[in-house]
Amino acid sequence: MKNLQNIKNVFFLGIGGIGMSALARYFKYRGMNVAGYDRTNTTLTSTLQTEGIDVHYDDDIRNIPSRWNPAETLAVFTPALPYDHKELSWFREKTMGLLKRAKVLGMICNEKSCIAVAGTHGKTTVSTMTAIILQQTKAGCGAFLGGISKNIGSNLLLPTENSPWIVAEADEYDRSFLHLQPQIALVTSIDADHLDIYGNKAKIEESFEKFISQIKPGGKLVLKKGVTLDTKKTNAMVFTYALKDTADFHTVNLQLQGEGGYYTFDLKTPDGTIANCRLNYPGLVNVENAVGASALAFLAGASADDIKTGLENYQGVLRRFDVRFRNESQVYIDDYAHHPAELEAVINSVKALFPNKKVTGIFQPHLYSRTRDFADEFAASLDLLDEAVLVPLYPAREEPIAGVSSELIFDKMKCNNKHLVEKGDVAALIKEHQTEVVLTMGAGDIDGIAGELIKVMKEKD
């Protein structure tokens, strides 16, 4: 299938995924018939249903719309689905189109000037910030995001008719980002991850170098300072960004305005300084993300005022340094961090934001393979906490691995104030302990206890 012009019906296998649901919304907006399957009913799938998209939760080919003309139908699937999935197998045997999510995203984005945000951490925040800034510009933009933006209440920013720009999160999992041919690309980080796919870090770096080689002629590449990629692999003009280190884009006069408050800074660019920037969204890690997003927006033609307004208006992304509760004595933050480097970044950002408060972190490991591969690093990151709570790991798509559990991390930790409990017992533990800043971390369903935690913290006052 070379184009999407003749498609009138799109069926999604795994429609509840964050990337899949954005595509589903896009095709619905385009006037196509959209339906799909997912394993579980979530807030996101329920929202899709309220938007007029038919979603079912049992793997049964009788749920596939029989009235759809095969010649006008596309099925989109996620690699997270098992190979023997009944509905996936049914489509595989038919003559109609069946494409991976990443391929379809590439077909949409490559028709425009794509701004692709890659990296093992920070993709969602940087891409969302970039989209919010470019929204301020006369040209505008569209965006496929890896999280629910609080500014727009969605993971899809509908493209304006005349805008050349479309912002996309470039996911390295399963080498998905190799379907993108961006005009401007950014790489936030390259840490060892997804070793179940890549095997080793060298293979990850090789994949990122292939990604940057696909930047269109006359394009631009933005690298976080310290990211070591062979830039000879791309013909793009290369720029760097950093939080405070000297780079093409970096902050000066960075200041935290009050404990737990906002950051102000001046932004150095290749064309001079954008003075008096303000990021109302908390966390030092997010200031660094803001520098990267500003670099992308600047290179896409955003003015200094556009950048300042976009940063000041940025409201965040669900589950990314997401302040869920706050009063005079307590704060609760929920974050998607699920890699040791992400845990370290978010914990250090919280400690910088609240230097005089006790930080209690609750972590749910994600995947057996990642827990096995990075147990030592997870333990070291969690040791940064004043109090650490581990709950059983979230397996996601994986089968159990013998000897691998949250206990593997727990036993390696040096923190004296640590607990290993069931997820359902966390609220009771928090109720019994003195807390000031509570932080939940993980890419599984740890955010499901948010309501209980907020209730307990409210009762403490």
Image (cartoon, helix red, strand yellow):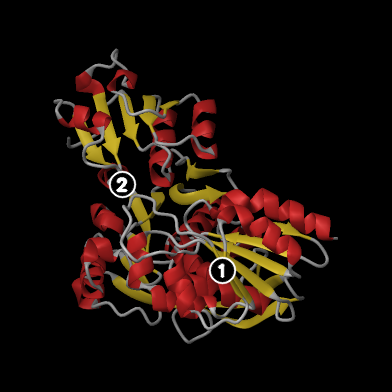
Is residue 317 visible to the viewer in this orientation of the structure? no
Quarter of the image where one finds residue 87: top left
Residue 243, x across and y down, in percent: 52, 79
Quarter of the image where one finds residue 378: bottom left
Q: Distance between the residues labelled 1 and 2?
A: 29 Å
Residue annotated with mark 2: 80
Residue 197, x across and y down, in percent: 24, 61
Amino acid bearing label 1: Asn
Q: Residue at x 27, y 77 (%)?
A: 229
Q: Residue at x 28, y 22 (%)?
A: 61
Residue 107, x across and y down, in percent: 26, 43
Amino acid bearing label 2: Ala
Say left or right for 234 vs 394. left
Find numbered disc 2 in the image and state the secondary structure of the residue it sits on: loop
Whether 56 is drawn above or below 302: the answer is above
Q: Quadrant of the C terminus?
A: bottom right
Comparing 171 with 44, the one in front is 44
Is residue 187 visible to the viewer in this orientation of the structure? yes
Looking at the image, the residue that sits furthest to the right is 461
Comparing 425 with 100, the one in front is 425
Query: Which mark, by number, is residue 286?
Result: 1
